[in-house]
Image (tube, rainbow, N blue to C red):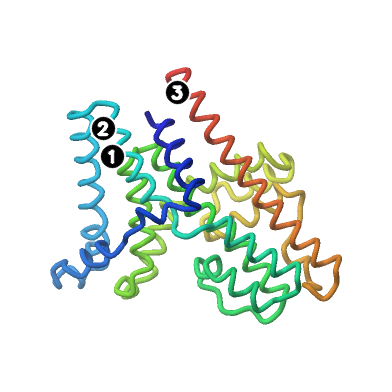
């Protein structure tokens, strides 16, 4: 049922452009505010008390759904919950709008279109086309990973509770109240992303430039210093044939550099699509051979 749940959820995302119809996060902020004030003296305990009860509730819902309706219940409960766990916003539309403005040389409009991607990295406004493109490239890579691949990894490993654990942890990092100890929250997210990003890097090696990406994958395999977006950037440079975002130093000032940077981001989109197809194929084979 895991494969069918994923396919139905992704199908609805393609139909709607995103999972926006089920992305309602007001309840999570409300739940966080309603927790006892005594928990706020311990950031780690507050994080656990905010995230874990909804995760446990999702596990109960899935058990009850299966007990009452069998496989149909798993689909009826699992598809909406998995949709909720997927990332917010329309990723493809955001990247396409950015590229259209980039090719036209409109940096202001391109920066506005890429704002959701840059927000993920909490980057300051770029001053040059080179800086803008580097930030968008890293932001697009991390956003795609965070909104889909990390969720699918934890869903396959732990089911809906695992996917919800990751999504609620990411939402918690965005709460203003969580900034009392942002380092703890970011460290927790980094731990949740550590294995999935390396699985994704190996996927890039299979569907991209194997030699370059596999070399980068081995170099970063046990790295504890780089952030997730930095590791992804290294993998992508290897998978795309050693292309470095910083090589677009001329930005939109020359047509050649403009096309080069645009082609790099388009290559990223194609690579992500092939990686997703690989993951779905692997899941289908696992179901077929009952692994």
Residue 80 sits in quarter: top left
In this orientation, does residue 194 appear?
A: no
- Mark 2 Cα-neighbour bin, 10 Å: few <14, some 14–19, many ≥20: some
Q: Mark 3 points at which residue?
A: 287
Q: Name the residue under label 1.
A: 77
Q: Is mark 1 on a helix, strand or loop?
A: helix
* Pair 3/1: label in front: 1
- Mark 1 Cα-neighbour bin, 10 Å: few <14, some 14–19, many ≥20: many
Image label count: 3
Q: Nearer the viewer, residue 57 or 192?
A: 57
Q: Name the residue under label 2.
A: 73
Residue at the (46%, 52%) spot, across then down:
193
Q: In which quarter of the image is the N terminus?
A: top left
Q: In this view, does 26 lie to the left or right of 273?
A: left
Q: Is mark 3 on a helix, strand or loop?
A: helix
Residue 123 sits in quarter: bottom right
Q: What element carries label 2?
A: helix
Q: Earlier in the sequence, mark 3 or mark 1?
A: 1
In this orientation, does residue 216 appear?
A: yes
Residue at the (71%, 76%) spot, across then down:
106
Q: In which quarter of the image is the C terminus?
A: top left
> What is the distance, in whole Å, between disc 1 and disc 2 at their CAs?
6 Å
Q: Nearer the viewer, residue 268 or 224?
A: 268
Residue 199 sits in quarter: top right
Say the numbered circle drawn on residue 228.
none
Q: Which of marks 3 and 2 is nearer the N terminus?
A: 2
Do callouts 1 and 2 mark residues in contact (Cβ within 8 Å)?
yes
In the image, is residue 177 above or below residue 235? Answer: below
Q: Nearer the viewer, residue 135 or 96?
A: 96
Q: In this view, does 279 lie to the left or right of 5?
A: right
Q: What is the residue that sits farthest to the front in this orientation?
A: 15
- Image coordinates of residue 230 in percent, x first then y, are 59, 60
């Amino acid at each position: 049922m895991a494969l069918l749940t994923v396919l139905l959820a992704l199908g609805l995302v393609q139909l709607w452009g995103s999972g926006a119809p089920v992305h309602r996060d007001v309840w999570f902020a409300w739940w966080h505010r309603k927790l006892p004030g005594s928990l706020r003296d311990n950031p780690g305990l507050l994080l656990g008390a905010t995230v874990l009860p909804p995760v446990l509730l999702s596990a109960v819902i899935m058990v009850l759904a299966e007990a009452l309706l069998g496989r149909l219940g798993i689909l009826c409960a699992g598809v909406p919950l998995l949709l909720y766990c997927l990332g917010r916003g329309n990723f493809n539309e955001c990247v396409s709008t950015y590229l259209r403005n980039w090719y036209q040389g409109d940096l202001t409009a391109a920066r506005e279109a890429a704002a959701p991607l840059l927000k993920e990295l909490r980057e300051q406004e770029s001053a040059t086309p080179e800086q803008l493109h580097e930030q968008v490239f890293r932001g697009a890579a991390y956003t795609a990973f965070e909104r889909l691949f990390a969720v699918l990894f934890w869903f396959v490993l732990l089911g809906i509770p695992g996917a919800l654990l990751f999504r609620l942890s990411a939402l918690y990092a965005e709460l203003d109240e969580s900034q009392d100890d942002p380092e703890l929250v970011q460290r927790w997210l980094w731990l949740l992303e550590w294995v999935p990003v390396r699985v994704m890097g190996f996927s890039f090696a299979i569907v991209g430039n194997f030699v370059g990406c596999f070399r980068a994958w081995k170099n970063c395999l046990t790295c504890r210093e780089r952030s997730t977006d930095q590791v992804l950037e290294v993998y992508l440079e290897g998978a795309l044939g050693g292309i470095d975002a910083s090589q677009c130093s001329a930005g939109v000032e020359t047509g050649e550099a403009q096309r080069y940077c645009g082609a790099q981001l388009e290559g990223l989109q194609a690579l992500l699509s092939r990686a997703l197809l690989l993951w779905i194929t692997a899941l289908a084979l696992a179901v077929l051979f009952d692994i």
